């Protein structure tokens, strides 16, 4: 028997459920499809994420060539390309790991139907999350909509499983032996798919992911104390590697559960948040276009296009917000604390619809993940499940003073303010920083306007 393993957001050759299962069945060929439906949404042809994926695929190809095999690369509609390839190779089954995004679920359903007409099995597996929707349920068997009880049940379920974290070993000696003429090491796929190589700040691939995980493990015990300070290297920066599957969620959990510190427990909580948001997206796909709490779609946002543009460019006159946005624009990265700050600022200080901010992040973030991005924005705008109360509005000044007290991060990204000392940097005076924009809105005034704007939902 021979099989085809279709890799998507699981770009690695270790601890890979679908690949492991495919290899167990027989000689296996790997394939990756550049999907024009997905690439077509990327308007910037220098998008760093394409290069990150490209680097990851190059690493995979190098490893496969050592085994006498190769990764088949295709460009086209997967609904057509996967069944055509499967039929050509005369495989008994196509194996892949589940994707919970609405487009992916619809795509995979169509692929499965076409394969069925060809007499070819289509097998999907849980891989990108540790627990799926049916595995963590309330006592009545329903889906959790509040994170804390979900987290408690997640941990309880994990403990009942004796904290077992399986390692899905991949016997690469059972790969199909061949040489692909258009492999990603010798063929210029950038030109074929219409993108320009633009190296990201973090290099793609499993080697880089594992190295970063090893580095983070040295500081994991201090994670709870250091994670909120953008000028401090206190986070893992593993989200992009987890997003593209260079490293498995099980790799992450093995490290998190090997430590008993409060830092490790806090990091574990972040991993569980990821499972939670994936589950919400899977069960409630309406969140892609609207609020989880549907009544929040009735809110009439009062913000202007000009204020939104200033936010995107880091020209709001609020130093920490501007530093965060300039960092995002230049690197494709943003510290988690800053994501909450700039999101709250856009929705509740500039009074701009959260969906505009979510869309901007989707275009810019190197680690963009639909479930996490959507969940985070709905949390900040109070429109999602278990979101912060609508009357909780981050004060951009106090957030700046608390989490970048010395102004290190601000000075790095806002050169107009580098000459300011002490607390001056959080409230820059025009005479001391003549080249820096004045605040485009009054925080205190717009806080009142925000509360009035949210009046429509206060009783829900």
Image: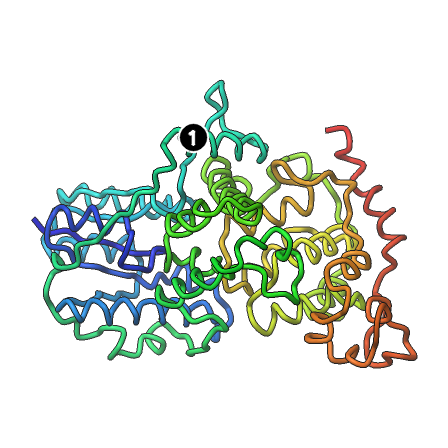
In percent of the image, x 27 and y 73: which residue is there? 184
Q: Is residue 305 left or right of residue 109?
A: right
Kindly state the secondary structure of the residue where label 1 is placed.
helix
Q: Is residue 287 above or below residue 305?
A: above
In percent of the image, x 24 and y 69: which residue is there? 61
Q: How many callouts does the rendering have?
A: 1
In percent of the image, x 20 and y 48: which residue is there? 94
Image quadrant in which the C terminus is located:
top right
Q: Residues within 10 Å of mark 1 (few under 14, many from 20)?
A: some
Tell which residue pokes out farthest to the top in this image.
Answer: 140
Q: Is residue 413 left or right of residue 260?
A: right
Give residue 126's quadrant in the image.
top left
Task: Looking at the picture, tell me which residue is in the foreground, 327 or 192.
Answer: 327
Q: Is residue 138 above or below residue 319?
A: above
Which residue in the protein does label 1 denote? 157
In percent of the image, x 87 and y 80: which residue is there? 434
Q: Is residue 140 left or right of residue 378?
A: left
Q: Is residue 246 left or right of residue 239?
A: left
Tell which residue pokes out farthest to the right in this image.
Answer: 431
Residue 212, position as x, y percentages in the image: 45, 64
Residue 268, position as x, y percentages in the image: 51, 45
Q: Is residue 82 above or below residue 432?
A: above
Task: Looking at the picture, tell me which residue is in the foreground, 220 or 454.
Answer: 220
Give residue 34's quadrant in the image.
bottom left
Residue 51, position as x, y percentages in the image: 41, 72
Residue 139, position as x, y percentages in the image: 49, 19
Task: Looking at the picture, tell me which residue is in the foreground, 240 or 438.
Answer: 240
> What scheme was used to colour the molecule?
rainbow
């Amino acid at each position: 028997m021979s099989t085809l393993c279709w890799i998507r957001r699981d770009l690695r050759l270790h601890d890979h459920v679908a690949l492991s299962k495919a290899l167990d069945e027989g000689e296996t060929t790997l394939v990756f499809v550049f999907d024009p439906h997905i690439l077509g949404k990327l308007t910037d042809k220098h998008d760093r994420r394409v290069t990150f994926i490209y680097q990851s695929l190059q690493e995979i190809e190098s490893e496969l060539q050592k085994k006498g095999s190769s990764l088949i690369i295709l460009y086209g509609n997967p609904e057509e390309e996967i069944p055509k390839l499967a039929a050509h190779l005369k495989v008994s089954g196509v194996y892949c790991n589940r994707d919970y995004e609405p487009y992916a679920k619809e795509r995979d359903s169509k692929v499965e139907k076409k394969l069925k007409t060809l007499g070819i099995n289509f097998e999907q597996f849980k891989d990108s999350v540790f627990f799926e929707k049916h595995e963590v349920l309330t006592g009545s068997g329903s889906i959790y909509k509040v994170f804390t009880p979900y987290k408690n049940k997640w941990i309880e379920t994990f403990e009942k499983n004796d904290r077992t974290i399986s390692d899905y070993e991949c016997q690469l000696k059972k790969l199909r032996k061949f040489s692909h003429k258009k492999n990603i090491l010798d063929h210029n796929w950038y030109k074929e798919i219409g993108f320009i190589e633009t190296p990201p700040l973090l290099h793609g691939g499993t080697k880089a992911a594992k190295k970063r995980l090893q580095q983070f493990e040295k500081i994991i015990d201090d994670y709870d104390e250091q994670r909120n300070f953008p000028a401090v290297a206190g986070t893992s920066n593993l989200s992009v590697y987890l997003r593209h599957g260079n490293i498995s969620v099980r790799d992450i959990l093995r490290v998190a559960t090997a430590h008993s510190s409060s830092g490790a427990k806090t990091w574990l909580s972040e991993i569980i948040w990821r499972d939670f948001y994936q589950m919400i997206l899977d069960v409630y796909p309406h969140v892609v276009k609207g609020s989880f709490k549907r009544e929040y779609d009735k809110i009439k946002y009062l913000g202007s296009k000009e204020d939104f543009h200033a936010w995107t460019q880091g020209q709001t006159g609020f130093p920490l917000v501007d530093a965060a946005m300039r960092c995002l624009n230049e690197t494709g990265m943003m510290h988690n604390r800053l994501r909450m700050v700039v999101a709250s600022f856009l929705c509740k200080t500039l009074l701009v619809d959260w969906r505009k901010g979510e869309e901007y992040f989707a275009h810019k973030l190197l680690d963009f993940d639909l479930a996490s991005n959507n969940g985070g924005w709905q949390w900040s705008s109070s429109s999602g499940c278990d979101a912060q109360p609508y009357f909780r509005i981050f004060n951009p000044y106090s957030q700046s003073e608390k989490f970048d007290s010395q102004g290190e991060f601000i000075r790095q990204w806002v050169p107009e303010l580098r000459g300011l000392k002490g607390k001056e940097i959080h409230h820059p005076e025009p005479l001391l920083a003549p080249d820096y924009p004045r605040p485009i809105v009054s925080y205190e005034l717009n806080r009142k306007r925000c509360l009035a704007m949210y009046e429509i939902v206060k009783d829900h």
